[in-house]
Image: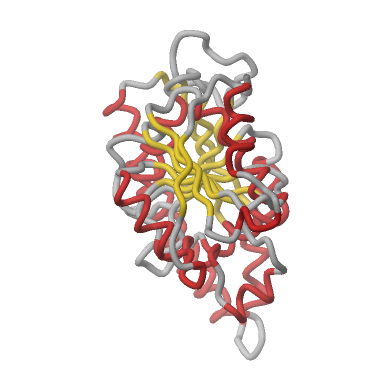
Amino acid sequence: MLSVKKILIPIQGTPLSESTLTTAYYLSKNYNAHLAVIHIQPDKKDLIPLTSEGLSGTMIEEVMNVAASENQKRLKLARKIFDNFVDEYNIELTDPNITEPSKDKITVSFTTLTGHENDLITYWARLSDITVISHPDSESEISSSEVLHTLLFDSGRPIIIAPKQKPQNVGKKICICWNGSAESAAALHASLRWLHFAEQVYIFYTNDYETNGKKIQDVINYLKFHNIQAKPHQLGNEKDVANNILAACNELGADMLCMGAYSHPRWQQLILGGVTRYMLENSNITVLMNR
């Protein structure tokens, strides 16, 4: 069975950070995993090309000072949310450089890094079992949308998008979107870490899946090899798949959805819409994505 020993959680110091940390906590409970929380601040050198054109030296320095002040405010808020989270769940705070996970309890660390956000998060995501990120709609000037897409395309690892609201449970009732693609297969395999502990598992599929000789029962049978009992759930109108997925999750009381991301090129998704983009914008439960 796949295990979870290290979960990466980037937080930006927005109100959604609380939900992100709580989601990661629930995902770690069955494994006593280490929660590696990171907060990334931009390097001052990266701001110079953005501010230098047409500005005097004094004006550039003033802009840099304002940016530094804002960064410190976000760091302070991120640390406050983190400390409250540690106290609420009574988690042991450890050194960020821990190399041996605890066998009997969850541990957590907080690290402040300086540099390019996308590069640093991608690097550390590749060295983590999974990354939990805030919902892309942060309702503030800070959004995790760009980082989220970078992780999906470049990290090579599954990611989990936390809901906007702090969850009460994660992984009790899990729904899996299946269309037979490589992306949906990757999500299915990534979800095995939590399917073993779920009370109910549903496999979503559309009306046209079985028209070419494919059988959803084959997916059900595969999961039985892992001692996982799943139920098929056929979605309705193929023209509104994304909305039907969310409606089915609400109907079944699901607290986690697992799905492949961007089965088509991203540019095509941006032009034509697509299930991935809709789910990123409208999901109200924890979502695991992989490609």
| Res 117 seen here | no
Looking at the picture, tell me which residue is in the foreground, 101 or 278: 278
Residue nearest the observer in this picture, 238 or 68: 238
286 relative position to 98: left or right: left
Is 202 drawn above or below residue 193 in the view shown? below
Q: Is residue 275 above or below residue 204?
A: below
The residue sitting at the top extreme is 104
- Image coords of residue 82 (percent x, y): 37, 37
* Residue 108 screen position, x and y as percent: 47, 26
Q: Position of residue 165 (x, y in %)?
A: 29, 50
Q: Residue at x 59, y 58 (%)?
A: 147
**Residue 58 position by quadrant:** bottom right
Residue at the image position 72 percent from the left and 69 percent from the top:
265
Residue in the picture at 65% in, 81% down: 52
Q: Is residue 92 left or right of residue 156?
A: left
Drawn side of residue 154 relative to residue 91, left or right: right
Q: Position of residue 25 (x, y in %)?
A: 41, 31
Quadrant in which the N terminus appears: top right
Count of numbered tags: 0
Specify the color scheme.
Answer: secondary structure
Q: Nearer the viewer, residue 19 or 100?
A: 19
Give the residue drawn at x 50%, y 29%: 195
- Residue 108 visible? The answer is yes
**Above or below: residue 49 compared with residue 174:** below
